[in-house]
Image (cartoon, grey):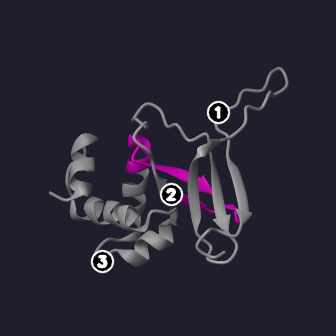
Amino acid sequence: MKRSSHILKDYNLRQTDCRNEILDVFLDKGFALSHGDVEEKISEEFDRVTVYRTLKTFVERGIIHKVLDDSGSIKYALCNDHCTTDQHHHEHVHFKCVNCGQTNCIEDIEVPQINLPKGYTSLETNLLIQGICEKCS
């Protein structure tokens, strides 16, 4: 059984060709992908709405998480083993290479705690570092 099938089973998601293909793309690439990136890598039989809904389901279940990049567009990256349907744990740094454009999760560097003024409540924190990745150095 393919790894994507195991993941879908672990998250109690029905096996579909679209879900398997999209998850395989994330497993193969290992870096953050935009909706358009995913569409380019899968078969043309799946329309844009189906891909969007699949990505949304994966985010809701804790399989992938959203990553903002410098353009303001959303990318998606695989979650680590600690995420659940109820809670994502993504207080880590994201790194975007200015040469190749890849955005990677750097899980071992946490986003520092920010003390907000009274009356403000943080729901999510994102930290994007731009520079040159190890492959492009």
The quarter of the displayed image where residue 118 is located: top right
Which numbered circle lies on residue 123? 1
Most distant residue in the left direction: 1
The magenta segment is: 57-76
Q: Residue at x 42, y 68 (%)?
A: 29
Q: Residue at x 59, y 63 (%)?
A: 103
Q: Position of residue 34 (x, y in %)?
A: 52, 66
The residues tagged by marks 3 and 2 sit, at their Cα atoms, a distance apart of 19 Å
Q: Position of residue 101 (x, y in %)?
A: 62, 73
Where the N terminus falls, by quadrant?
bottom left
The residue to which callout 3 is attached is: 43
Q: Are the residues at dot 3 and dot 2 in contact (C-beta closer than 8 Å)?
A: no
The quarter of the displayed image where residue 69 is located: bottom right
Which numbered circle lies on residue 76? 2
Q: Is residue 28 magenta?
A: no
Does residue 50 show up? no
